[in-house]
Image (cartoon, grey):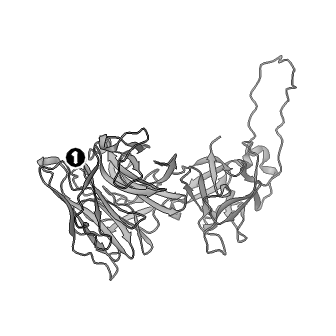
């Protein structure tokens, strides 16, 4: 994190969902990894303070962190929260002097009677003449219980030190080691026997002209070496791209990983400039996919009309209505063409809707034929709130008000009108393999979370999510 001038930003509420950015007051720079505490999400940023969200979608100011400084990170260890942050440093203005400090709290809720940070302690530092800046802290509690801290910026090496998970202090006698160059805002994560070092590459703090992007290397050993997908060491400037500018947003930096369930992961970071929000730095949360053992940013599902395809067989979700044939002349096999071929119009809603029942219609899965009873429109419902996955959606048959709904019997059906009831609101998560999980906000009469499943090749239902089963996975096609 190069030095950043904290601006006084208006707290305008955002009315429309933003692809790749949260809503409410998501204005932050250098956000920490998301932390969940007593029913709410928290993230801290440069300059002190941070954001709070009750659902992971709508964010507001209110998180508190003493010490000011830059680029904090937070991690839960047991029943406490450890926060690391940086004082001074950054390499500009002719100084590399800086410190990384840690402190504890029992809770992140500033309204709790237990809210009280311990006195900060210094765990890493740099002097004016060093080739490293003690700034941009990143924390990892490894599977073996050891606690690690990365720090550093573009103006030298990225370094790794070990901390004591009981005290948050630096392990006695532990000396930092160099693990990367040409990046900053690093953090380590662990998955399937690999340690991944994610760092932010490119230019920082230049608003709409920032070239920040997030890259990654990996190692079987936490001490490195960290190598990218083509064999380059991150000590030599290597790194595979995870996310760069997209959708009128630029300056992706400060990666954090959140695992909600097996196969359901999110990555948090900031966009240094959201063009649709005046170029402000905003919190972003995207699906985290894994491809060939490498992390990459996914895509939140956008409003539109889709085929909803079951991963189980490749059949399509559809209304259980009679199949209406298209009346078109057939060309006999082997017959010589005597006239130029003319296009055949696709079947229209007006061609078939009169044949559908007026009330509730069951839903099934069948061969996709791009027919009106197989075309589903996803529309965000901002007033219904959202989750880390994004806003809740209503799912209707294209051109109608007929909506997909969960039933008390833990089945699915279509109802004639969308009413905004919880059983008609759908959370849609892109999974780590790129497919999607479709989950009603609430199933009437059921407390446990249920998702849309393919109970048989032609039978949709609701059931428990199992990442290992293709029955639980869906694709959205815009054919």
Against 374, residue 79 (above or below) is below
Q: Which residue is mark 1?
A: 156
**Residue 233, percent across and down?**
35, 42
332 and 124: which is toward the camera: 124
Q: Quadrant of the C terminus?
A: top right
Q: Give above or below for 471 relative to 231.
A: below
| Front residue (pair 305, 56) | 56
Q: Give how far across and how far down residue 236 sits, in percent.
A: 30, 40
Q: Quadrant of residue 405?
A: bottom right
For image coordinates 42% across by 52% down, the residue present is 220
User: x%, y% of residue 224?
Assistant: 35, 51
* Along the line of sight, the residue nearer the viewer: 372 or 161: 161
Q: Is residue 139 left or right of residue 313?
A: left
Vertical relation: 466 (above or below) 350:
below
Disc 1 is placed on an element classified as: loop
Residue at horizontal 23 percent and vertical 69 percent from the top:
66
Q: Which quadrant of the structure image shows residue 83? A: bottom left
């Amino acid at each position: 994190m190069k030095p950043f001038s904290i601006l006084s930003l208006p707290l305008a509420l955002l009315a429309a969902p933003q692809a790749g950015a949260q809503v409410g007051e998501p204005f932050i720079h250098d956000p920490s990894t998301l932390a969940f505490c007593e029913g709410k999400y928290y993230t801290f940023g440069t300059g002190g303070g941070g954001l709070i969200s009750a659902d992971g979608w709508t964010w507001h100011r209110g998180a508190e962190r003493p010490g000011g400084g830059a680029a904090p990170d937070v991690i839960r260890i047991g029943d406490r929260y450890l926060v690391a942050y940086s004082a001074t440093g950054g390499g500009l203005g002719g100084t590399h002097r800086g410190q990384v400090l840690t402190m504890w709290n029992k809770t992140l809720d500033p309204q709790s009677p237990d809210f009280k940070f311990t006195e900060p302690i210094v765990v890493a530092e740099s002097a004016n003449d060093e080739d490293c800046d003690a700034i941009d802290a990143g924390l990892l509690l490894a599977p073996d219980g050891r606690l690690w801290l990365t720090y550093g910026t573009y103006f030298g090496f990225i370094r790794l030190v070990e901390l004591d998970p009981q005290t948050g202090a630096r392990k006695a006698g532990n000396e930092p080691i160099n693990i990367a160059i040409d990046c900053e805002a690093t953090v380590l994560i662990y998955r399937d026997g690999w340690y991944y070092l994610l760092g932010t590459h490119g230019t920082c703090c230049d608003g709409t002209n920032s070239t920040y992007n997030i890259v990654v290397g990996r190692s079987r050993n936490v001490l490195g070496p960290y190598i990218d997908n083509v064999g380059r060491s991150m000590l030599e400037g290597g790194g595979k791209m995870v996310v760069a500018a997209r959708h009128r947003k630029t300056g992706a930096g400060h990666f954090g990983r959140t695992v909600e369930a097996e196969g359901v992961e999110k990555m948090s970071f900031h966009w240094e400039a959201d063009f649709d929000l005046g170029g402000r730095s905003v919190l972003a949360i995207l699906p985290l996919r894994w491809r060939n053992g490498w992390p990459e940013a996914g895509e939140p599902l956008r409003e539109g009309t889709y085929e909803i395809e079951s991963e189980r067989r490749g059949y399509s979700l559809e209304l259980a209505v009679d199949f209406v044939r298209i009346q078109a002349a057939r060309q006999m096999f082997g017959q010589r063409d005597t006239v130029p071929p003319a296009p055949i119009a696709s079947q229209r809603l007006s061609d078939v809707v009169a044949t559908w029942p007026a009330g509730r219609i069951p839903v099934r899965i069948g061969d996709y034929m791009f027919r009106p009873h197989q075309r589903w429109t996803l529309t965000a419902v901002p007033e219904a709130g959202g989750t880390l996955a994004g806003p809740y959606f209503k799912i209707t048959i294209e051109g109608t008000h007929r909506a997909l709904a969960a039933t008390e019997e833990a089945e699915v059906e279509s109802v004639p009108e969308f009413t905004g009831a919880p059983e008609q609101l759908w959370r849609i998560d892109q999974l780590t393999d790129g497919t999607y999980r479709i989950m009603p906000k609430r199933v009437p009469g059921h407390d446990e979370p249920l998702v849309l499943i393919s109970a048989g090749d032609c039978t949709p239902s609701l059931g428990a999510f199992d990442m290992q089963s293709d029955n639980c996975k869906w694709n959205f096609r815009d054919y």
